[in-house]
Amino acid sequence: MNAKEQAKILIEALPNIQEYHGETIVIKYGGNAMIDEELKKAVIQDILLLHLVGIHVVLIHGGGPDISAMLSKTNTESHFENGLRVTSREAMDIVQMVLCGKVNKDLVNLLDGKGIGLSGIDGGLFRAVPYKDETNTDYGYVGEIINVDPKIVQDLITQGYIPVISSVAAGMHENATYNINADTAASQLARALHAKKLILLTDVPGLMRDPKDPSTLITRLKVSQVPSLVMAGIISGGMIPKVDCCVESVRQGVQRANIQDGRVPHSILIEILSDEGIGTMFY
Ligand code: ADP
Ligand code: MG
């Protein structure tokens, strides 16, 4: 590519930069896109670039594969029920060590001195109670966020940092820590921050009519159309909380929510700075 072509590409991004300048974008990162070092580098480069053009990026991460690895290394029992990791006191210690320690600081370290690592415990950011559903299963220290205080995150943004947040919460009523689904934490934080956009990076192209057929990707979806898709049984497994999070955040003022493929290099830049977009956009 010659210099003229390069300049043309940069200038094409100008309207998008203007649209998002000074606005907040919450990005949830986890799973496969976080294991692969090359992809991780691309995600971090995207975040740095957005930050440097004046977009306020907040990164929330999970770390399922790292947690599983450490649980088995330390012979700590844990199993899944209804798609959730039943988390004992001992398992919660490992979750906290891995998420708030290893995974969080490794991401911060990649952000070239611009990142500040926090957990949902810091500054009273997330308060949770034990998660309950209609099956009455005891999930242990799996939590449901019932209060968000975004002040610490707003302060860091104001001071020019990129907040990097692990999805762990403090107990609302007792001195305990809880393991929180990172999609849910991202959605709740996006709402509390009045973010313009929520991006959930995952390991599929987006919401598909047939999960086995990428050509059935739904590229745009009005939140009012979601209930009919749920009725049709199109949404299942880990996609259920993701879609719920997108619907809830858009209903509560986040302008757009996107589920997109974190395995595509620079998928964040494609979504924010190009006119094409990627994945499924909820509006
Ligand atoms: P993450 O680690 O990103 O949270 P999850 O495994 O929790 O990923 O959720 C994504 C998964 O949801 C996909 O890998 C896919 O198997 C499943 N899924 C269920 N229904 C759909 C659908 N309609 N379209 C796309 N993915 C779906
Ligand atoms: Mg999930």
Image (cartoon, grey):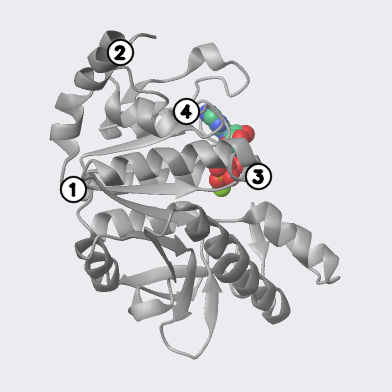
> N-terminal of the two: label 1 or label 4?
4
Rate crowding at label 1 as few (under 14), some (14 to 19) or many (20 or more) other CA atoms within 10 Å.
Answer: some
Residue 3 is tagged as 2
> N-terminal of the two: label 2 or label 4?
2
Rate crowding at label 4 as few (under 14), some (14 to 19) or many (20 or more) other CA atoms within 10 Å.
Answer: many
> N-terminal of the two: label 3 or label 4?
3
Question: Is residue 54 shown to the viewer in this render?
Answer: yes
User: Is 194 or 252 nearer to us in this picture?
Assistant: 194
Distance between mark 2 and mark 3 Cα atoms: 35 Å
Distance between mark 1 and mark 3 Cα atoms: 32 Å
Q: Which three-letter amino acid code belongs to the residue tagged 3? A: Ile
> N-terminal of the two: label 1 or label 3?
3
Of the two numbered discs 1 and 2 in the rendering, the one whose residue sits closer to the viewer = 2
> N-terminal of the two: label 2 or label 3?
2
Which residue is disc 3 drawn over?
35
Distance between mark 3 and mark 4 Cα atoms: 22 Å
Q: Is residue 197 left or right of residue 186?
A: left
Label 1, ligand 1: CB separation under 8 Å? no
Residue 207 is tagged as 4
Q: Which residue corresponds to the image point at 47% horizontal and 18% vertical from the top-left?
A: 217
User: Is 13 or 127 nearer to us in this picture?
Assistant: 13
Rate crowding at label 3 as few (under 14), some (14 to 19) or many (20 or more) other CA atoms within 10 Å.
Answer: few
User: Residues at badges 1 and 3 in contact (C-beta under 8 Å)?
Assistant: no
Q: Which residue corresponds to the image point at 40% horizontal and 38% vertical from the top-left?
A: 46
Distance between mark 2 and mark 4 Cα atoms: 38 Å
In what element is the residue under mark 2? helix
